Image (cartoon, grey):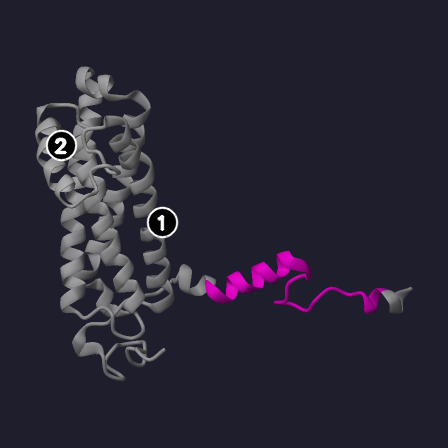
Amino acid sequence: MSGTAEGRAGPPDGAFAGGWTGAVRRRAVRALPPDKLLPTTQPEYVASWIYVFGVLTLSSLVVVVLTGCVLALFGPAWWHVSDTGRFVNSLHLWSVELFMFFMVVHLWGKFFMAAWRGRRALTWITGAVVFLTSIGAAFTGYLVQQNFDSQWIADQAKDGLNSVGVGAWFNVLDFGQMFMWHIVLLPLAVVALAVWHMLLVRLRGVVPPMEAATPGAVPGTGGSREGA
């Protein structure tokens, strides 16, 4: 029995059990190594202020999503009549303003740093697509305010969208349609793209400054590792 038990011993340390769950786990660990997803150290150049705007953008996005969920649950009457509703509505608006501001600074900062260097092209592309998708989310947000501003914006946008032939599918005068675009479709796209962007940043690493793009120029890293 002892020999049989030894023959049926489990996999060695560091290996996973068989079956499809083990295969999925091995594939996930290879694709998303834990030491890259949750690093304990970062290069010294990350202490620069230009690297802070990405985190500020994500922090603003969290506030945008949380306040948007509250507004969606209570509805337009609440954010027009209730003092608390108006406060949450203002918090949602200004968090969007900060989100767009931080993202624009982050985008331009990475553009002038040529952040697509070192196999980071997809990281740059996903960040740019997040920005474009956020414009659509902000636009639909202005349309669902249900005040004179939203009516004027919708009336002006209607003519522009009809002129390019998309007004029949994207009707800015239809509050229900714009509300669903604003609270379901576009937020899901922004959050999904932002998560994808963050995973790519973790996997490919933070882009080094131009002056640190030579071997030995980055303290403690042995170079920028752009070819990795």
Frontmost residue, 173 versus 22: 173
Residue 31 shown in magenta = yes
Q: Is residue 49 above or below residue 43?
A: above
Residue 181 visible at all: yes
Tag 1: residue type?
A: Ala
Residue 202 image position (x, y, % from top left): 36, 62
**Can you name the residue that lies furthest to the right here?**
1
Residue 90 image position (x, y, % from top left): 16, 29
Tag 2: residue type?
A: Ala
Q: Is residue 113 left or right of residue 21?
A: left
**Proximity of marks 2 and 1: CB atoms separated by less than 8 Å:** no
The part of the chain drawn in magenta is 5-32
**Can you name the residue that lies furthest to the bottom here?**
215
Q: Is residue 66 left or right of residue 152?
A: right
Find disc 1 in the rendering and name its residue: 192
Secondary element type, mark 1: helix
Residue 154 shows which numbered tag?
A: 2
Q: Is residue 128 above or below residue 141?
A: below
Residue 196 image position (x, y, % from top left): 36, 56
Say which residue appears at 23% left-offset and 17% top-offset.
Answer: 77
Front position among marks 2 and 1:
2
Frontmost residue, 11 versus 149: 149
Secondary element type, mark 2: helix
Say which residue appears at 18% left-offset and 22% top-offset.
Answer: 86
Say which residue appears at 21% left-offset and 52% top-offset.
Answer: 131
The C terminus sits in image quarter: bottom left
Number of disc labels: 2
Q: Is residue 78 above or below residue 61?
A: above
Question: Residue 54 occupies which quadrant of the picture?
Answer: bottom left
Question: Residue 42 occupies which quadrant of the picture?
Answer: bottom left
